Amino acid sequence: MKAHLLPLFGILALVALLRPLPAAALDEATTRLARDIFQQLIEINTTDSVGSTTVAAEAMAKRLLDAGFAREDVTVLGPNDRKGNLVVRFHGSGARRPILIIGHLDVVEARREDWTTDPFKFVEKDGYFYGRGTQDMKVNDAVLITTLIRFRRENYRPDRDLIVALTADEEGGKSNGVDWLLKNHRDLIAAEFVLNADSGGVTTVKGKPVNLDVEASEKLYADFEVRATNPGGHSSLPVPDNAIYHIAAALGRLERSPFPFELNPVTHTYFERRAALEMGQTAADMKAILRTPADAASIKRLSADARYNSLTHTTCIATMMTAGHAPNALPQLAQANVNCRILPGHTAEEVRLELVRIFADPKIGVRYVDDARNVYNVTPEKKAFPTILPPDEILKPLARIADEMWKGVPVIPSMETGASDSVYTMAAGLPSYGVNGVAVDQDDIRAHGKDERVRVTSYYDGVEFYYRYIKALTSPQ
Ligand SMILES: [Zn+2]
């Protein structure tokens, strides 16, 4: 094994010395258009606190209208004047049912004092574009609008309608645009399947592409309130029964009780393909967990890495805690929030009952908390959708274009361990796949963080990627 790996190491070392180069050169007009759109989007504040997705949606609508889109095909609509969503339809021949492509316009809050540059100024520096949304995900909103305008400029005629929806409140807030559109304007976004440009993407190491992810599955998000109450009393006369101790002991048991290891068709394929890119112990462990039965020592070693742990387990973790009402009183109440990310195929209620079993304390109540912070004794029907591998229709052109653009880079189906708007489209019965072609270095993930940035070349590659991929999906077969 080692002898074979050595020359490969040599090649990787050489490649690592090269500066990252764009995979495909765009013409000048497209480059300028792509850059202008990106800049415009970054400089419109779309945070939940003070921003407006409507302003961004209208700016993009204007660009589409100026490029020749018909009025009736470009709509900005939403539940209130600050949470507008853009829906645009690019007409095809109608030979096949439409494709819906979604992206969110809102961004996470960013404070000027935390950043080196102004988060709402588009800054190009040292080969990167900086600004809030350069990774998550105005970068791909800009890619999508650029792609539509390119298609329009060249009078491209797809064999099916393309619907692009750029929406509000993916990052939180009360007006999730995808949810709202599905509930109020389902006809406007009816499609055969959904591409979500918020997930997937190219993983690079120091600018060198390693793999292209396609998100094919998603964990289920659930919060639980863990609560102990007590009559309390004077702290000079303590009794053994203490609400804080109950919660502390329960959380200790949770820490020592991981949920079982489990693979599904998507994560199975993920580790199979990922193993081929890894070396040494990690590669061996990835192969060993695919066997039946999976190797326990390998599971243990891989699970020490938070990413691999979250891909192979339902996780529940304490995220908030409040207790007591005075420094000199016994606590009458102690409670914690336990946040769970549930593997597909399991329900939130199943996990709630498992928490009750792990805590093994009749004094502790475990209740489900929804996004609006309503509390339920029994979890309302909430289930992670079973995973299916993306069909060839999705994967084959993806593999071909990945190979054209980033020679030999494998496409790896993955499971999102966080949550995206695909949770709504999947719940509505629309198969949803996370696809985009923007590369981010494995160790440079700055989404939601400070000094968010994307490589200039990665952005333009992402522009070219979507153009080619949508063409492949919409060209007469
Ligand atoms: Zn996002």
Image (cartoon, rainbow, N blue to C red):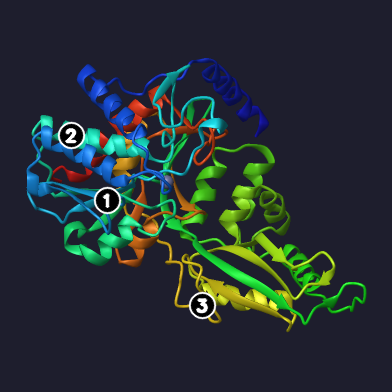
| Closer to the camera in the image, 219 or 474 | 219
| Separation of residues labelled 3 and 1 (CA atoms) | 31 Å
Residue sitting at the far right: 236
At which x and y percent is residue 17? 55, 15
Tell me if 342 is positioned left or right of 396 in this view.
right
Cβ–Cβ below 8 Å for labels 3 and 1?
Answer: no
Secondary element under disc 2, as helix, strand or loop, is: helix
Secondary element under disc 1, as helix, strand or loop, is: loop
Determine which residue is flagged by label 3.
379
Tell me if 447 is positioned left or right of 54 in this view.
right
Task: Of the two numbered discs 3 and 1 on the same chain, state the one appearing first in sequence.
Answer: 1
Q: Nearer the viewer, mark 3 or mark 1?
A: 1
Q: Is residue 359 above or below residue 409?
A: below
Q: Is residue 251 above or below residue 447?
A: below
Three-letter code, disc 2:
Arg
Tell me if 59 is positioned left or right of 328 in this view.
left
- The local crowd at label 3, few if under 14, some if 14 to 19, many if 20 or more residues have their Cα within 10 Å, is many
Instruction: Place residue 13 in its image quadrant.
Output: top right
At which x and y percent is residue 243? 77, 74
Q: Nearer the viewer, mark 2 or mark 3?
A: 2
Three-letter code, disc 3:
Thr
Determine which residue is flagged by label 1.
84
At which x and y percent is residue 450? 54, 34
Tell me the quadrant of the picture where the N terminus can be found.
top right
- Does the Cβ of the disc 2 residue fall within 8 Å of ligand 1? no
Give the label on residue 63, or none.
2
Does residue 130 appear in the picture of this structure?
A: yes
Seen at 75% across and 70% down, the residue is 247
